[in-house]
Structures are given as C-alpha cells and as structure tokens.
Amino acid sequence: MTVFTPRQAARVLLLDAEDRVLLFHGWDPARPGHRYWFSPGGGLDPGESSVSGAARELAEETGLRLAPEQLGAPVWEETTAFSFGGRWYRQQQEFFLSRLPDGPAVFEVDTAGFDQTERDSIDEHRWWSVAELEVTPERFYPAELPVLLRRLLGGER
C-alpha cells in the first residue's frame, strides 16, 4: 500500500512580454531518468498562505521579488500525486499568474536562492510558448498547462 504525505503548495505561471511561461527542467533524485519541466513554486511553510508562499518561492527560485498582493487570486488549483526522493506525496496546489514587470531592464532568472535539493535536481530553465508546449515530446507538469495558458491568455497566442 502506498502511503501519501499530504502537502500544500503554490506555483507561479510567470509570463514574459511574449506570453511565454518560465519553466524549470529537473528530475526526481530517486529516478534520475524521470525528467520534466515545471513552473516555479513549491511547498508552503507551516501557517503560510498560498499567495505568500507563491511570492516567497518566486523570489527564491527566480530572484523576482513581488509582494503577495501583486499575484492576486489563484487562477487554477489541482490535487496531484507524485513521488520524489523515494517518498510519495498528495499535493494540493494553487497556481498564480504573473507577468514580468514592465521596465527597461531585461529580466535575468537568478537561481541563487535554490536550496540544495533544487541545486541537485534542476539543470536548466527556459521560456516556453504555448505552441511549443503543445508539440514538444518532453514531459511537463501540469499536463494541462497549454490548455490552461490558452484560457488565461484569452485564446490564440
């Protein structure tokens, strides 16, 4: 019988000016061949709200510091089950949508805030268009991401 550890998480769908979403590429340390792309975010600290956790995770994983109120309300939520590091989780997660702030500077993703597990299991990041996600043979989570982004972006992009 599989025992699931319950976990609350928050994730950010961070878009650039071209409506591309930032995803990280990583793997499960217990299954290094299981590679996938995923959005910034992660587990909530005890007593932390999902929006505060999303803002904290975004800062830690990308260097982009936004106040929680800048993220607004969640745009999607799901419950997912997965294994990581030999342990099974049942994770309830909320997704927030954010765009890079306007400004003259080009945003450079800064992963200096990664913890050791992230440094050991994430090897790259890139900006993906919806069209690229729809045709890639690579694995990404959530699998509904292209449909979700098309809905959030108001149709075709």
Image (tube, grey):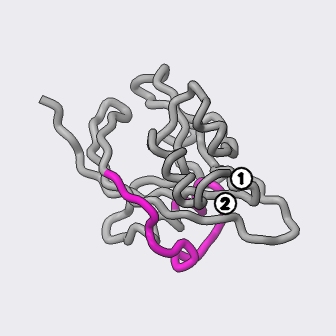
Q: Which residue is drawn at 64% across and 49% down?
A: 22
Which residue does the numbered mark 2 point to in the structure image? 63
Is 84 located above or below residue 98 in the figure?
A: above
Q: Are marks 1 and 2 in contact (CB under 8 Å)?
A: yes
Residue at the extreme right = 104
Instruction: Give how far apart the Cα atoms at labels 1 and 2 are.
Output: 6 Å
Q: Residue at x 66, y 43 (%)?
A: 128
- Comparing 29 with 126, the one in front is 126
Residue 26's quadrant in the figure?
A: top right
- Residue type (three-letter) at the residue carrying disc 1: Val
Residue 78 in percent (x, y) is at 34, 53
Residue 68 in percent (x, y) is at 52, 75
Say if the magenta span includes residue 80: no
Residue 42 in percent (x, y) is at 45, 53
Q: Is mark 2 on a helix, strand or loop?
A: loop
In this picture, which residue range is highlighted in magenta?
A: 57-78
- Comparing 92 with 2, the one in front is 92
The answer to whether any part of residue 120 appears in the image is no
Which residue does the numbered mark 1 point to in the structure image? 109
